[in-house]
Amino acid sequence: MASRNNSFTAVIVGANAAGLSAASKIRRMQPQARVLVFEKSPDVSYAACGIPYWIEGTVPSAEKLVQLTPETIREKRGIELFLTHTVVHLDAARKQATVVNSATGREFSMPFDRALIATGARAILPKWPGSDAKNIFTIRSLDDGKKLQAALTARVQHVAIIGGGYIGLEMAEALRARQRKVTLIEKLPQILPGYETQIAQRATELLKQHGITVYSGVEVTGFEVNKANTATAIRTASLPPRIEADMVLVAVGVRPEVELARQAGIALGTTGAIATNDYLQTNHRTIFAAGDCIEVTHQLSGKKVWLPLGPAANKQGRIAGENMAGAHVRYWGALGTAVFRAFGLEIARAGLSTGEAEQAFGSAVVTHIRAHDIAGYMPGEKAIDVVLIHDKRTKRLLGAQLAGHHCIGKRVDVLAAAMFAKMTVSDLQKLDLSYAPPVAPVWDPLLIAANVAAAK
Ligand SMILES: Cc1cc2nc3c(=O)[nH]c(=O)nc-3n(C[C@H](O)[C@H](O)[C@H](O)COP(=O)(O)OP(=O)(O)OC[C@H]3O[C@@H](n4cnc5c(N)ncnc54)[C@H](O)[C@@H]3O)c2cc1C
């Protein structure tokens, strides 16, 4: 724990998961510290992950997605928060941030003792011909969500989503719930890149059952745009050569937001995200970085990877804040544990994919089982797919993927814990997992998969 007599000024760039976690931690540990948070957008502390559910209508308003209001942050947490303020330069040597108030255009300097870059990630919008048309959207910030929501008028009947990742699928469900015709276009041969074929196929079938037209292996090349700068159709490199749409959502992935860091001479890693040491310090030791803008060490492979996910951003922000306040806490890396739901099907993964496991460990054994998710005689029973990936030589569990309707998130968490503890598939067989007919079968699907994997 840092000394409470030790006062300093902390400048934090970015006021979402990582930035605000750090700011709150510093204030708790060092009540005398001056903590200034600059955020370029008008929004703060919002759950980006909830945007699809607001578009869908399950969450009634954008305000509900805001976890802490600016007033709470300022008055209850004692943080000096500046919205619509962009940090345009960090001078690491002079320990000074240059900030522009985008409302007034005023530029000013802010000296700091320690700074945190928590600039997150930005949505990729490829420079396809016509991609600046006014009915083409990406979803990253709350502001993006507001723009899409406002544009989703009765005239918009057909929405094309480019990108078959988890945000594409969540948005497909949201737009179907809003009674729109939805077409999903994925460049790769299957949707859900990084997932095993069995999981991707199950998701594809489900999308089709819910009326989504799915094109995989179809590469977008541009848009047909009318005189009003509205895209009327998507051009592709294969069949179908054109897909008409009233609105397009581009959900082809995100990139770390590293421009500020790059300009400040902060080293980037092999993934293109900011490189930090285990204490989340950059190569300039007074400047820390956390959240989606940094790369992390994979807990299994030991390799540097980029895993932009909410829980990791929150944890890293908290640890960066502790270290900025004088502690010496290590960040232990990540496994990329993730879960999402589309049309009632929960899909989750943790650890390495088969390809990643082969690359890191030389060999990977893949086990796929399909089982009952609750007792087979109970109403509501559905199939669960479990994929386990283990190292052939040591039998160590290296990866897991699941799809089903019951407790998928918590089951993947069991497997994430097993991977963290370096368990083998034989260890997994010995776990004492719970059972009750409406909740889980007497042989939990994880144990069935472990039994099959251990016998291989
Ligand atoms: C639609 C959607 C659904 C998602 N669903 C999930 C999910 O289910 N599970 C999950 O784990 N993750 C999910 N995520 C990802 C999750 O939201 C992110 O991992 C998390 O928000 C990262 O937090 P962060 O603080 O690192 O970055 P961000 O949330 O991106 O925040 C960075 C902030 O920095 C600000 N900023 C950038 N540059 C500057 C500058 N120069 N000056 C001032 N401010 C600046 C930005 O405006 C932004 O507010 C989802 C994301 C989206 C968009």
Image (cartoon, rainbow, N blue to C red):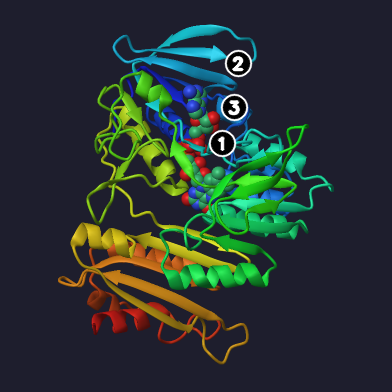
What residue is disc 2 on? 102
Q: Is residue 407 visible?
A: no
Q: Nearer the viewer, residue 425 or 456?
A: 456
> Disc 3 on helix, strand or loop?
loop
Closest to the camera, between mark 2 and mark 1, is: 2
Q: Quadrant of residue 210?
A: bottom right
**Which label was assigned to residue 364?**
none
Q: Is mark 3 within 8 Å of ligand 1?
A: yes
Residue 419 image position (x, y, % from top left): 28, 63
Residue 277 visible in image: yes
The amino acid type found where label 1 is placed reads Ser
Q: Is mark 2 within 8 Å of ligand 1?
A: no
Disc 2 is placed on an element classified as loop
For the C terminus, the image quarter is bottom left
Between the C-alphas of marks 2 and 1, the distance is 19 Å
From the top left corner, tell me how far across and down residue 391 is, in percent. Answer: 21, 69
Amino acid at circle 3: Ser
What is the quadrant of residue 196 in the picture? Answer: bottom left
Residue nearest the observer in this picture, 392 or 323: 392
Single out the mark in the foreground, 1 or 3: 3
Quadrant of image for the N terminus: top left
Instruction: Tell me the distance, in whole angstroms, between the alpha carbons under discs 2 and 3.
Output: 9 Å
Q: Badge 2 local density, few (<14 within 10 Å), some, or many (20+)?
A: some
Q: Is residue 326 left or right of residue 235?
A: left
State which tag comes first along the sequence, 2 or 3: 3
The residue located at (62%, 31%) in the rendering is: 43
The residue labelled by disc 1 is 45
Asked if 286 appears above or below 341 in the picture, the reply is above
From the image, tell me which residue sits under label 3. Answer: 41
- Residue at the far bottom: name it: 377
**Nearer to the camera, 289 or 202:** 202
Lower position in the chain sequence, tag 2 or tag 1: 1
